[in-house]
């Protein structure tokens, strides 16, 4: 081992506490990169591979009913390389342990020359070719109800009971995220997917020789918008509701939203730690160069080149970074595995393997090493440019003078020890400022994580208690006259009924368009209605449409602007209506119109396809039993069950994420405070020893050092709260999507929790440094040459 390498090891061992503190900050950045990038890559790779192997379609369309002969015309559309048709029908089911009617979506088994959306059989067997009662069950539903091949199921389709046998358990690329109509998250207890032979489903739904679902696979050079336009024209006569691309398909849009959030986390969080590490290394290596001036001069005098000296100190920085990289690799992989377990619960792939590719590890290492080199650059330049004669001479003593505080009387009444604290902080403004900045970033990081609890509470309260206050949502098999409300109102336990007309539409403003849905509500609706920015109910006018803020921003329209509406159901009229209002909602892309006006445009009279009701809690079980027997009911969903499930998911996911980021923020605060306090102790060891010799008690000396730590930390608290406010704003913007928006909310208690967590981290780092005061050898320190 060469002399400089031995010196390197000795130097790092002497400042091992600082080395570990800085390495942990770098490790946090590396762990975040590995966690988010690794999870992102694994999820994206799994999705793309699954889609390719199972021929996931590019274009989807639903319609009322078209003859099987239409498939020939669909296949003739240019750039279509494969087409598949099928049948879909919702049903009500009764499952043990669930009082609500369970919703089931029965889908015909994929068929055709070019098999699209292929199923992955997990357990059991495929239904026999001539079977009329064998079904495949989606794995999530099977797990929720402990179903196995051979188990029996009962379903009500169009008011008629059907009995089925579970042949096997399967997965489909269409239902990786198996979300029921109107649900916010998958509810495997109350919604399931079932695949059955097409002939059997056609017989149960009176769809012999016809289909109501289309899927297309396009060539790589195809223009999907042109294909959609041609397909819509072809299916218009058959009640088509408008074709849409894969990115608008419900399951894929949720996966894509999650991928975007993971990508955003990679862009925002790691730079905070890397920037802090750059400054910490700058100070640490700079102090090392300053204390080794004589050694640097001697090394140059005996023949060591400037390059060798520069590489020596660069190696110090890279070695510290290397320790952080190794720790970060293992920590990030472990945390990523935990995140993958959460995804496995909600995203149903045949195999979701958390596998971090080598380029993720390599990329994190390269970024960290580059940051370490940047941090050490100023100190290396100083060591290289230092002439031997000047280096071996003692540094010029620090010049002291009356400061601003003494001249203006600001320090009047401050004790001598207090003045010592303030003077030292002012003497090193860059280092003091860095410590404040590091603690500020730690607080901001904590706030940007803890505020999710506040935001989710507001989002849930707005959706489940203000905008929607019904107990049950009932969807009809087809549009029904308003007399359906009386049929439901007569059921035992029903307290209030409101009807809705929900339609699939395409909203058009100039060159911008968006496929979404319009809710037709009655003007006096009380159970479900849009809210304005202040949380007040918006009364729907006789004319015009009310858009939620996110949708209005996407379409670039404001209140009073004219908006085109292409109705994708029924007679499919094109409308031009004014934007009557803007609502403030956090879930979905909602649009609202007066139900009477909407029905008038469609020439349908007073009809509805959805009912929302409130039910007496005591009689709810009887209500469910009765509603299950009504032939025009396609599905029933409970708002309370959705709220409970959503809160459960949030608690699981947020607890995991918050735990990780609280740990990261604590490491950041600890590393910054410890590094500053340790450097102070090294620099002022002679001063502290002299104070002890002069008669100062150990506690008094500790008070001086501890006060510096406390003053810097307390100075960072208000700045951290301000920066955290801005970081939360940034996070909310990055994590918003068409599916949901995170409201910007930070409760006062959240600021308190973040401050307390940082104070605890700073306290422990200060205690560790104060413990080193007892290791000072007063005689040896006083004999040291200045």
Image (cartoon, rainbow, N blue to C red):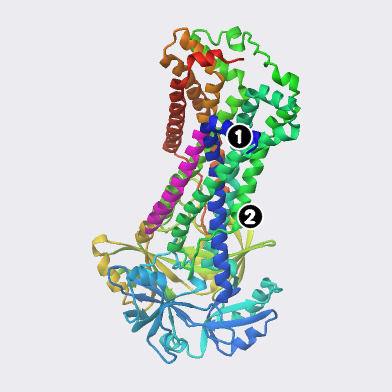
- In the rendered image, the vertical position of residue 30 relative to residue 717, given as above or below: below
Q: Is 742 inside the magenta-drawn segment? A: no
Q: CA distance from mark 2 to mark 1?
A: 69 Å
Q: Residue furthest left?
A: 618
Label 2, secondary structure: give it: loop
What label does residue 522 carry, if any?
Answer: none
Question: Is residue 654 within the magenta segment?
Answer: yes
Judge the density around disc 2: few (<14), some (14-19), many (≥20) Cα neighbours within 10 Å.
Answer: some
**For the magenta stretch, what is the residue range?**
645-671
Q: Position of residue 167 (x, y in %)?
A: 38, 82
Is 155 placed left or right of 671 in the picture? left
Q: Earlier in the sequence, mark 2 or mark 1?
A: 1
Q: If the image is split into quadrants, where does the N terminus sit? A: top right
**Callout 1: helix, strand or loop?**
helix
Q: Nearer the viewer, mark 2 or mark 1?
A: 1
**Residue named by callout 2:** 557
- Camera-side residue of 608 and 2: 2
Residue 672 to residue 180: above or below = above
Q: Which residue is mark 1?
A: 6
Residue 645, image x, y percentages: 37, 59
Q: Which quadrant holds residue 236?
A: bottom right
Residue 774 on image: x %, y %: 43, 21
Q: Residues within 10 Å of mark 1 (few under 14, many from 20)?
A: few
């Amino acid at each position: 081992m060469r002399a400089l390498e031995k010196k390197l090891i000795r130097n790092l061992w002497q400042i091992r506490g600082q080395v570990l503190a800085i390495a942990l900050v770098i490790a946090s950045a590396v762990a975040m990169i590995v966690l988010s990038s690794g999870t992102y890559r694994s999820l994206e790779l799994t999705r793309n591979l699954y889609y390719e192997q199972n021929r996931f379609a590019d274009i989807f369309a639903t319609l009322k009913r078209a003859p099987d002969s239409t498939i020939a015309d669909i296949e003739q559309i240019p750039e279509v390389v494969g087409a598949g048709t099928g049948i879909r029908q919702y049903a009500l089911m009764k499952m043990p342990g669930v009082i609500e009617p369970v919703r089931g979506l029965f889908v015909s088994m994929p068929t055709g020359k070019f098999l699209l959306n292929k199923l992955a059989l997990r357990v059991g067997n495929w239904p026999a070719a001539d079977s009329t009662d064998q079904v495949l069950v989606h794995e999530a539903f099977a797990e929720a109800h402990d179903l196995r091949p051979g188990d029996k199921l009962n379903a009500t389709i169009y008011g008629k009971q059907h009995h089925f046998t579970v042949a096997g358990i399967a997965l489909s690329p269409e239902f990786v995220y198996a979300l029921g109509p109107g649900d916010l998250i998958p509810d495997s207890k109350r919604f399931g997917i079932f695949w059955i032979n097409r002939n059997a489903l056609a017989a149960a739904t009176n769809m012999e020789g016809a289909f109501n679902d289309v899927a297309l696979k396009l060539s790589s050079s195809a223009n999907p918008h042109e294909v959609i336009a041609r397909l819509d024209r072809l299916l218009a006569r058959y009640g088509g509701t408008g074709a849409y691309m894969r990115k608008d398909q419900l399951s894929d849009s949720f996966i894509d939203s999650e991928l975007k959030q993971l990508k955003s986390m990679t862009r925002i969080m790691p730079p905070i730690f890397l920037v802090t590490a750059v400054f910490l290394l700058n100070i640490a290596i700079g102090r090392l160069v300053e204390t080794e001036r004589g050694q640097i001069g001697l090394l140059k005098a005996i023949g060591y080149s400037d390059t060798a000296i520069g590489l020596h100190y660069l190696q110090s920085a890279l070695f510290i970074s290397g320790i952080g990289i190794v720790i970060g690799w293992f920590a990030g992989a472990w945390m990523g595995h935990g995140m993958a377990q959460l995804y496995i619960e909600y995203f149903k792939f045949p195999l979701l393997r958390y596998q971090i590719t080598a380029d993720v590890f390599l990329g994190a290492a390269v970024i960290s090493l580059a940051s370490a080199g940047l941090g050490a650059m100023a100190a290396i330049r100083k060591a290289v440019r230092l002439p031997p004669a000047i280096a071996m001479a003692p540094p010029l003593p620090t010049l002291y003078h009356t400061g601003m505080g003494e001249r203006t009387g600001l320090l009047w009444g401050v004790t001598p020890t207090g003045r010592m604290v303030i003077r030292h902080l002012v003497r090193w403004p860059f280092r003091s400022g860095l410590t404040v900045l590091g603690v500020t970033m730690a607080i901001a990081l904590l706030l940007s994580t803890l505020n999710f609890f506040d935001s989710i509470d507001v989002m849930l309260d707005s959706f489940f208690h203000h905008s929607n206050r019904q107990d049950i949502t009932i969807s009809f098999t087809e549009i029904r006259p308003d007399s359906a409300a009386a049929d439901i109102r007569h059921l035992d336990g029903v307290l209030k009924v409101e009807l809705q007309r929900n339609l699939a539409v395409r909203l058009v403003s100039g060159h911008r368009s968006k496929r979404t849905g319009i809710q037709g509500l009655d003007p006096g609706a009380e159970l479900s209605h849009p809210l304005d920015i202040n949380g007040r109910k918006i009364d729907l006018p006789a004319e015009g449409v009310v858009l939620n803020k996110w949708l209005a921003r996407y379409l670039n329209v404001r209140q009073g602007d004219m908006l085109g509406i292409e109705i994708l159901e029924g007679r499919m009229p094109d409308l031009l209506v004014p934007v009557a209002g803007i609502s403030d909602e956090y879930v979905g892309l909602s649009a609202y119109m007066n139900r009477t006006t909407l029905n008038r445009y469609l020439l349908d009279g007073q009809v509805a396809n959805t009912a929302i009701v409130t039910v007496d809690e005591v009689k709810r079980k009887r209500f469910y039993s009765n509603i299950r027997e009504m032939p025009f009911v396609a599905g029933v969903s409970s708002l309370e069950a959705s709220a409970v499930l959503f809160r459960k998911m949030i608690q699981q996911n947020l607890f995991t994420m918050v735990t990780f980021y609280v740990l990261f923020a604590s490491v950041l605060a600890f590393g910054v405070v410890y590094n500053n306090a340790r450097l102070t102790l090294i620099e002022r060891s002679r001063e502290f020893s002299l104070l002890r010799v002069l008669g100062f008690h150990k506690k008094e000396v500790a008070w001086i050092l501890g006060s510096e730590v406390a003053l810097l930390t307390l100075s960072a608290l208000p700045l951290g709260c301000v920066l955290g406010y801005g970081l939360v704003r940034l996070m909310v913007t990055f994590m918003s999507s068409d599916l949901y928006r995170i409201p910007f909310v930070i409760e006062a208690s959240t600021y308190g929790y973040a401050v307390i967590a940082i104070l605890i981290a700073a306290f422990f780092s200060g205690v560790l440094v104060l413990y080193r005061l007892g290791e000072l050898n007063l005689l040896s320190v006083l004999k040291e040459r200045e």
